[in-house]
Amino acid sequence: MSVQSQLGDQVRFVGVPGLADNAEMSEFLSKHGVSGFPHVPDPTAEIWRRFGVTSQHTYVFINDDGSWRKAGYGNLLGDVQGLVNS
């Protein structure tokens, strides 16, 4: 079961494929079956730069108040559960 299916009622997930245009993003979503939540193309990596993202498998957690933190290559489910439960 995916993190989104487990916690999607408590957390909004948005994918941001860096350096991908709409066609590349659509192909990736179809190939990997991750179209169950919104994705925003970021062909110039502007969003990635805003949050200090430098590679795939980076997660940015944004709170309702606009504060954020970056993590990556960790336990996404554990990280999200920790934020939800804190």
Image: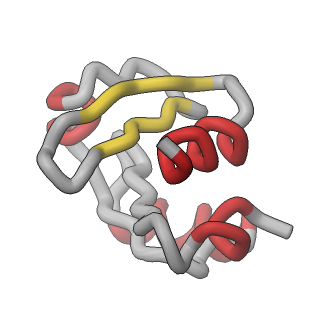
Give the residue at the far right of this rendering: 1
Q: Position of residue 58 (x, y in %)?
A: 51, 30
Query: In the rendered view of the protein, which quadrant contains the N terminus?
Result: bottom right
In the depicted structure, whether residue 41 falls above or below residue 65: below
Residue 55, horizontal then vertical, whole percent = 49, 23
Horizontal side, residue 32 vs residue 42: left or right: right
Compared with residue 54, is residue 3 higher up or lower down, i.e. above or below?
below
Looking at the picture, tell me which residue is in the foreground, 85 or 39: 85
* Residue at 61% in and 36% down: 79
Looking at the picture, the colour scheme in use is secondary structure
- What's the residue at 50%, 24% (across, down)? 71
**Where residue 17 appears, x then y in whole percent?**
43, 50
Foreground residue among 59 and 84: 84
Q: Could you say where residue 19 lies in the image, as x and y percent from the top left?
A: 35, 41
Q: In the picture shown, does residue 41 fall above or below 27?
A: above
Q: Nearer the viewer, residue 43 or 57?
A: 57
Seen at 49% across and 70% down, the residue is 10
